[in-house]
Amino acid sequence: MSMQWKEEYATGLPKIDDQHRQLFKFVNDLEVLVADWPCHQDRLGSLLSFLDAYTRSHFVYEESCMYRMNCPSARDNREAHKRFLRFFGDWQEEYRKNGASGETLDELRMTLEDWLASHICKIDTRLKECAHTV
């Protein structure tokens, strides 16, 4: 079941919301890849590279916005981002050592879905309270 953007995920900052929508699209693309695994394994490398680069860029931008707006969740946000990057780095290392299977990719997809939805709802949406300061 693909991830759907909901207005309750809105942060009050259009650029961040657009970036979140792009991350949702990534998870949906990964879901398609998992469903047809191993038929589209040639796409896996580019998807993983995208996720790595995009999340790092997004996290830097989002963190700078939170700090600039004195958002009370800025520290929690930075720590959550560090935990995600650690998880994804560990996952990538395992992938480099052992390759991917439909099961390991589905585990990645489910973790991403859970993380995205809970992180956005619990931390990122707190930006709404501060968005007027931009």
Image (cartoon, grey):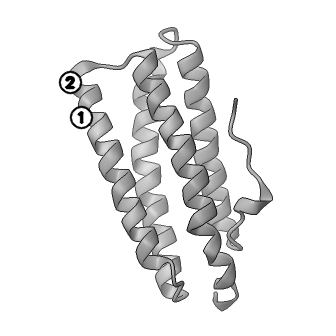
Given the image, on which type of amino acid does mark 2 rest? Lys
Residue farthest toward the top in the current orientation of the protein:
39
Q: Is residue 119 above or below residue 98?
A: below
In percent of width and height, residue 70 lies at: 51, 89
Element class at badge 1: helix
The answer to which image quadrant residue 9 occupies is bottom right
Q: Residues within 10 Å of mark 1 (few under 14, many from 20)?
A: few
Please tell me the numbered disc located at residue 115. none
Which residue is identified by label 2? Answer: 97
In percent of width and height, residue 75 lies at: 41, 77
In percent of width and height, residue 87 lies at: 33, 46
Q: Is residue 126 above or below residue 132?
A: above
Which residue is identified by label 1? Answer: 93
The answer to the question of whether label 2 and label 1 lie on touching residues, with beta carbons closer than 8 A, is: yes
Of residues 115 and 34, the one drawn nearer to the viewer in this rendering: 115
Residue farthest toward the left in the current orientation of the protein:
97
Of residues 95 and 118, the one drawn nearer to the viewer in this rendering: 118
The residue located at (48%, 40%) in the rendering is 111
In percent of width and height, residue 4 lies at: 74, 43
Q: Residues within 10 Å of mark 2 (few under 14, many from 20)?
A: few
Relative to 17, is 88 on the left or the right?
Answer: left
Given the image, on which type of amino acid does mark 1 rest? Glu
Q: Is residue 123 above or below residue 3?
A: below
Residue farthest toward the right in the current orientation of the protein:
7
Which quarter of the image is occupied by the C terminus? Answer: bottom right
